[in-house]
Image (cartoon, rainbow, N blue to C red):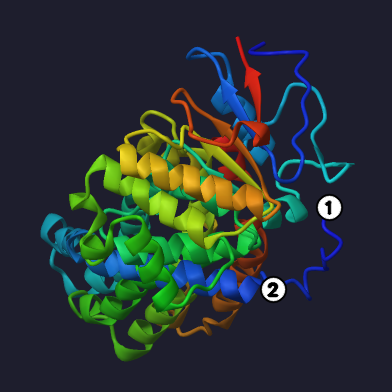
């Protein structure tokens, strides 16, 4: 058993930051919340009702950003972003895509194939995706990995905007995120 | 649950949108890695060409075994391409996003299978009449063998996708996939190659082709759901 006796809730406009040593189940917890992994026991409630993995209502309202960036080396940064965002059900215009890439400092890289981008630049495509997908709940697994200071600033800005608009964020991270303290709850695992 | 949650028919996330996303993306990816597709097609051509070299070049013998050889080569070419159907999407995390997408997952999976058939199955069908000439097949036999491949190769892709999803993340998944899926290919092979035999014996091929068609319908209805379930197990 990885963890037991865990109970928490996240309100609209609030962020829950999960911290803890490696191997204590942060990723597993996020995957259970997203519906990818079946918990051995327990209940997950969304808007007060118990949900099962892959419930349609939950899939329409959550955004999961895992360890893997889900990028295709053969596609350009812009094509990757369009593909990911439209898989999540949004149809951004070309202007929206370019604006999101520019905000992530990828304006000059947008026509380059993803295989030539650095690790940090690949993560920035993930940030541009967050900017284009306003969902009530974001599940972020190590969102700060490989980001430089401006990247971290952009991440904090995106999360703050998500919270301002009444969305909720659950993030597992080792690095401190620069968020307003009154909007953040903490969960320490392990 | 959202108050705006709607039934499947009213949902903005319809099966057609899912299909369009998956087909367009996978065709674009296939186009960017054309060399891989070329290798598979070349494999098919070489396997078909090897048989006359290994057995006697006698004309009646070649005409007898021609349809069977075309079919066996199609099975092998299909097996060669199947491990790649989901492997890269599994490795880079795209499958997680596909599983969590608001679009219906069986429709997304069916789109991927359709794109797989368009890039690996359809070229085999198109090449079949040309390769059949090597075996001295006459026009009725060529027509029927091509038609049987046109109905049969989508079944190979659909059944193969189930096997590919079940062997995701397994070490040596390629050979396990072959063991798992070849027995399921046997009925397709029998009816597919049998159609041309019937024509050569002066009978109608309609019984064989109808059975293949029934198999295609069955695979079309069942395989996307089974494959989606297999992927969810692999992701757990």
User: Which element is circle 2 on?
Assistant: loop
Q: Where A147 sits versus B148, above or below?
A: above
Q: Mark 2 vs mark 1: give the one in front.
A: 1
Q: Can I make out residue B184 in this image?
A: no
Q: Is residue B207 left or right of residue A55?
A: left
The answer to which quarter of the image holds residue B147 is bottom left
Q: Residue at x 84, y 46 (%)?
A: A47
Q: Quadrant of the C terminus of chain B?
A: top right
Chain under disc 2: B
Nearest the viewer among B55 and A26 is A26
Q: Is residue B182 left or right of residue B105?
A: left
User: Could you say where residue B127 lies in the image, as x and y percent from the top left?
Assistant: 26, 77
* Image disc number at residue B213: none
Q: Can I make out residue B143 in this image?
A: yes
Question: Residue tagged by mark 1?
Answer: B1
The answer to which quarter of the image holds residue A29 is top right
User: Could you say where residue B1 lies in the image, as x and y percent from the top left?
Assistant: 83, 52
């Amino acid at each position: 058993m990885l963890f037991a006796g865990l109970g928490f809730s996240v309100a609209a406009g609030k962020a829950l930051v999960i911290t803890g040593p490696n191997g204590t189940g942060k990723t597993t917890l996020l995957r259970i919340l997203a519906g990818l992994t079946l918990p051995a026991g327990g209940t997950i409630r969304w808007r007060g009702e118990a949900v099962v993995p892959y419930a349609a209502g939950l899939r329409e309202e959550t955004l999961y950003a895992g360890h893997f960036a889900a990028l295709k080396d053969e596609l350009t940064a812009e094509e990757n972003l369009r593909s990911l965002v439209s898989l999540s059900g949004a149809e951004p215009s070309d202007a929206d895509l370019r604006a999101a890439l520019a905000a992530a400092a990828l304006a000059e890289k947008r026509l380059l194939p993803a295989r030539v981008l650095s690790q940090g630049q690949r993560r920035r495509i993930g940030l541009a995706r967050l900017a284009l997908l306003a969902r009530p709940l974001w599940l972020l697994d190590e969102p700060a990995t490989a980001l430089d200071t401006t990247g971290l600033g952009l991440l904090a800005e995106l999360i703050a905007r998500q919270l301002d608009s009444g969305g909720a964020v659950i993030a597992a991270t080792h690095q401190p995120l620069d968020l307003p303290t009154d909007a953040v709850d903490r969960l320490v695992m392990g | 649950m959202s108050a705006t949650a709607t039934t499947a028919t009213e949902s903005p996330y319809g099966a057609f949108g899912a299909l369009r996303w998956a087909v367009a993306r996978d065709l674009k990816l296939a186009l960017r890695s054309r060399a891989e597709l070329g290798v598979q097609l070349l494999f098919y051509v070489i396997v078909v060409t090897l048989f006359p070299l290994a057995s006697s070049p006698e004309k009646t013998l070649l005409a007898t075994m021609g349809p069977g050889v075309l079919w066996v080569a199609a099975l092998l070419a299909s097996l060669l391409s199947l491990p790649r159907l989901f492997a890269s999407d599994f490795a880079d995390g795209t499958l997680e996003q596909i599983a969590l997408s608001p679009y219906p997952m069986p429709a997304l999976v069916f789109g991927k299978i359709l794109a797989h058939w368009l890039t690996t199955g359809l070229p085999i069908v198109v090449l079949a009449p040309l390769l059949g000439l090597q075996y001295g097949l006459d026009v009725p036999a060529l027509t029927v063998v091509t038609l049987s491949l046109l109905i049969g190769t989508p079944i190979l892709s659909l059944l193969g996708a189930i096997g590919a999803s079940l062997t995701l993340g397994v070490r040596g998944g390629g050979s396990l996939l072959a063991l798992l899926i070849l027995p399921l290919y046997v009925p397709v092979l029998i009816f597919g190659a049998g159609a041309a035999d019937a024509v050569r014996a002066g009978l109608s091929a309609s019984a064989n082709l109808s059975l293949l068609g029934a198999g295609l319908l069955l695979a079309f209805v069942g395989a996307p759901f089974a494959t989606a379930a297999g992927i969810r197990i692999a992701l757990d």
